[in-house]
Structure formats: structure tokens, C-alpha cells
Image: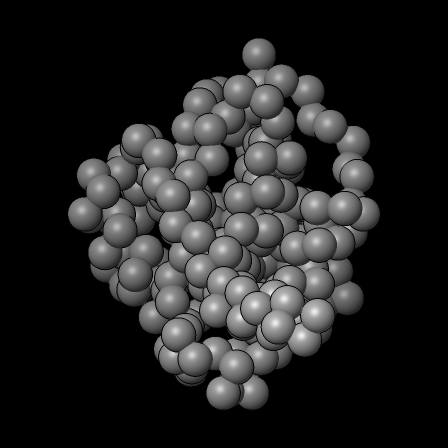
Amino acid sequence: MAGLGGAMAAVALFGAYPFLAVTQRVETKILVVEGWVDAHAIKAAVEEFHRGGYERVFTTGGPVRGLAGYLTDQSTTAGVGASRLRQAGLPAERVQMAPARELARDRTFGSAVALREWCATNGVKLARLNVLTQDVHARRTRLLFEQGLGPGVGVGIIAVPHLDYDAGKWWRYSEGVRSVIGEIIAYVYARCFFFPEAPRSAA
């Protein structure tokens, strides 16, 4: 029993980060960037845009934390992210924010729904897209975007590594422990206890 417990602990220790920080791209011309990501992830998004031959970049996110609620589109993380991408060198005409104007039960799911509604309103057909986010948030992001966008939309995911800790030894860093353990809990919640209303097919 002790050996089995040790083996399970080792699997959890060494397997948690690569399980959460998954990168699996799909073939697409649309890149989605979560607007709250750190500066190094914004830089990675610019590099991804040029390397991947994308035609459009959408930024997502709701009201910036600390505000009582929605004020303007620019006061959302989608607005902030779009501004940062332009400042980092992306052509302004290629960047489009799709802000969430309501505080959702799950911010990531609300961001996906807001993107779906923006595209439906503006006649943009979503078939496949890649979402760029920050390291261990990736697997939950993909799950919630799949739920928020609905059937028929292929969602790829790109995880940008964190700069504040070594991904291979995350348990040795307080930031790594907070990020990984917190995201494990959040993923289990999203997978097992979060049951949003299924969005209608894009068709």
C-alpha cells in the first residue's frame, strides 16, 4: 500500500503540469488570446501569429478585476489584451476584441460565449481556432471554450510556459504550487460540477 501510494504521488507530482499545460494546435487562420495573460505571453502570441500564418486575432475577457462591473469595452481584459497586442507590433486591423460585458459564473466560459456571440452578430463563421493562454490554465481553457462555443467548432490550445518557476520542478516554487494545485481544483470543478446551458450550434 505504501508503494502504491508513493507511485500515485509520483505520477501526480510529475504528471500534473504536462497534463494541465497542454498544447495541441489545430489548422486554422484564427488565433484567440486570453486578454489577462502576462507580458511574456503577449510576446509569445505575436510570435505565434507570424509563425502560424494567422489572419485574425481575437482577444477575450470580461471586466478587469477590481471593477464593480462592466464600464466600457476598453475596461475589459479583452480590451486591455487587444491594446497590448497592438503595442507589441500586431497590425491594428488584424486584432479584434470580443469582450464579455457581464460577470459570468466562470470567466473563461463567459469569454467563450462572448466570442461566439460577437462572431454571430458580425457574420464571422467559426469552424476552427487556436486559443493561447498561460501554462496550467490551458486544459481548462480548452474545455470551457468547447462548451462555450458549442458543437461544430474545433478548439486547439496553446500553453505559454510560466516564467516564475521551472515547469519540471514546479513543487519547489511557491508560485508553482499555487498555480498547479489551484488549477487542478479548478479543472475538477469545471469537469465535474460546472454544467452551463449548452449553446446552440453555430448553424
Residue farthest along the top direction in this orientation = 203
Residue drawn at (30%, 61%) of the image: 44
Residue 158 visible in the snapshot: yes
Residue 83 sits above or below residue 140 on the image: below
The colour scheme used here is one colour
Residue 126 sits above or below residue 111 on the image: above
Which quarter of the image is occupied by the N terminus? bottom right
Residue drawn at (77%, 37%) of the image: 196
| Left or right for 182, reference 193 | left
Residue 162, given in percent of the width and then of the height, sits at 41, 72
Total number of numbered discs in the rendering: 0
Residue 99 visible in the snapshot: no
Residue 73, given in percent of the width and then of the height, sits at 58, 52
Which quarter of the image is occupied by the C terminus? top right
Residue 174, given in percent of the width and then of the height, sits at 56, 87
| Left or right for 189, reference 173 | right
Residue drawn at (34%, 70%) of the image: 40
Residue drawn at (78%, 31%) of the image: 197
| Left or right for 194, reference 7 | right
Residue 162 sits above or below residue 52 on the image: below
Residue 87, given in percent of the width and then of the height, sits at 30, 64
